[in-house]
Image: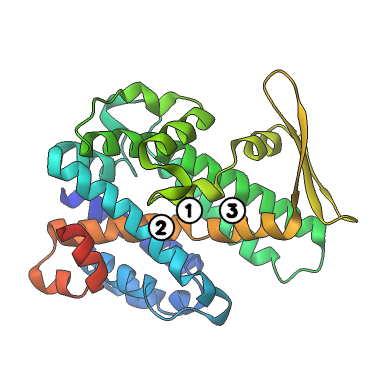
């Protein structure tokens, strides 16, 4: 890694913690984040806070938060065993295009996701179902767009880790084809990345993006049309849809937690590394 990664993370974490994106408790401690001018110290604190006590409404999602962080660390670790330079580029793709692939940097998609998460959480206390639907559908689209960008990078890094040939052109492939390829590489629902496949839905994502999805308030269902040539009518229970969206709220933080852990392990002192959760240290050392 290079110090630039931790420096850029410092800028993002400081700004978002002040905005309250990482929760009210983190917002209260934003002054403490601002007082830390050492990037590694900030990254360490973020990982520790990320794995710290959750508010009651988020406790049931602790396993998902851990999952989102660890799967990214596993991809980085396996790629690094074969090509340390590629693993570095995978982590740095947060703010820098991956190996000349224009538009592959994830920061813009990540920012859109972070804003959608914040807006969705703000809308939850409202009793207006249509308002919640608007914010939830925006968040669903945002996290699928983020995954659309991330999956291409994960395919390249994972194929590298498997010592398979890879094409950088996969990064620009369609979302559906990337989901299919990564599923074939990792055994889909039966493999270690199972949760990613359960929260992705390219059909609904395309329908929302093209205004072909709507909330049936009376039936409490999300109805949408999708298909390239022959359009098919599909439906998803509102509660199931909101469950997917709720899982999606943890992707942005999980991604930053993983990058922060990588920065600490690669750039930090032995004392800083020991502050990370043991499970993360074990993943990166395996």
Residue name at image x 68 percent, y 49 percent: 137
Quadrant for residue 52, please give it: bottom left
Farthest residue in the left direction?
Answer: 270
Determine whether the residue tagged by mark 1 lies in a helix, strand or loop. helix
Tally the marks.
3
Whether tag 3 and tag 1 are in contact, CB under 8 A, the answer is: no
**Which residue is more in the foreground, 150 or 31?**
150
Q: CA distance from mark 1 to mark 2?
A: 9 Å
* Circle 1 Cα neighbour tier, 10 Å, few/some/many (<14 / 14–19 / ≥20): some
Whether tag 1 and tag 2 are in contact, CB under 8 A, the answer is: yes
Q: Is residue 8 visible?
A: no
Mark 1 lies on residue: 195
Give whichever of discs 1 and 2 has the lower sequence position: 2
**Which residue is more in the foreground, 183 or 16?**
183
Mark 2 lies on residue: 68
Image spot of residue 175 (x, y percent): 51, 32
Whether tag 3 and tag 2 are in contact, CB under 8 A, the answer is: no
Quadrant for residue 184, please give it: top left
Residue name at image x 34 percent, y 44 percent: 94
Determine whether the residue tagged by mark 2 lies in a helix, strand or loop. helix
Give whichever of discs 3 and 1 has the lower sequence position: 3
């Amino acid at each position: 890694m290079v110090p630039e990664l931790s420096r850029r993370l410092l800028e993002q974490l400081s700004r978002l913690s002040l905005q309250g994106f990482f929760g009210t408790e983190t917002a209260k401690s934003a002054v403490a984040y601002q007082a830390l001018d050492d990037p590694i110290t900030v990254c360490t604190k973020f990982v520790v806070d990320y794995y710290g006590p959750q508010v009651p409404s988020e406790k049931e999602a602790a396993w998902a938060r851990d999952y989102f962080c660890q799967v990214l660390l596993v991809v980085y670790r396996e790629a690094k065993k074969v090509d340390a330079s590629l693993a570095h580029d995978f982590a740095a793709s947060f703010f820098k295009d991956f190996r000349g692939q224009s538009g592959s940097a994830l920061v813009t998609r990540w920012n859109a996701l972070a804003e959608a998460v914040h807006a969705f959480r703000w809308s939850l206390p409202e009793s207006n179902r249509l308002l919640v639907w608007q914010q939830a559908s925006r968040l669903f689209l945002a996290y699928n767009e983020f995954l659309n960008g991330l999956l291409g990078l994960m395919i390249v890094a994972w194929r590298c880790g498997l010592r398979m040939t890879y094409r950088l052109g996969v990064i620009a492939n369609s979302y559906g084809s990337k989901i299919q390829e990564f599923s074939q590489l990792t055994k889909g629902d039966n493999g270690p990345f199972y949760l990613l496949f359960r929260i992705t839905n390219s059909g609904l994502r395309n329908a929302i993006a093209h205004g072909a999805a709507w909330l049936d308030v009376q039936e409490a269902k999300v109805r949408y049309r999708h298909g390239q040539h022959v359009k098919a009518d599909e439906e998803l229970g509102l509660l199931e849809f909101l469950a997917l969206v709720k899982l999606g709220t943890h992707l942005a933080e999980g991604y930053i937690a993983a990058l922060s852990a990588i920065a600490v392990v690669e750039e930090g002192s032995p004392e800083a590394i020991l502050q990370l959760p043991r499970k993360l240290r074990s993943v990166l050392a395996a």
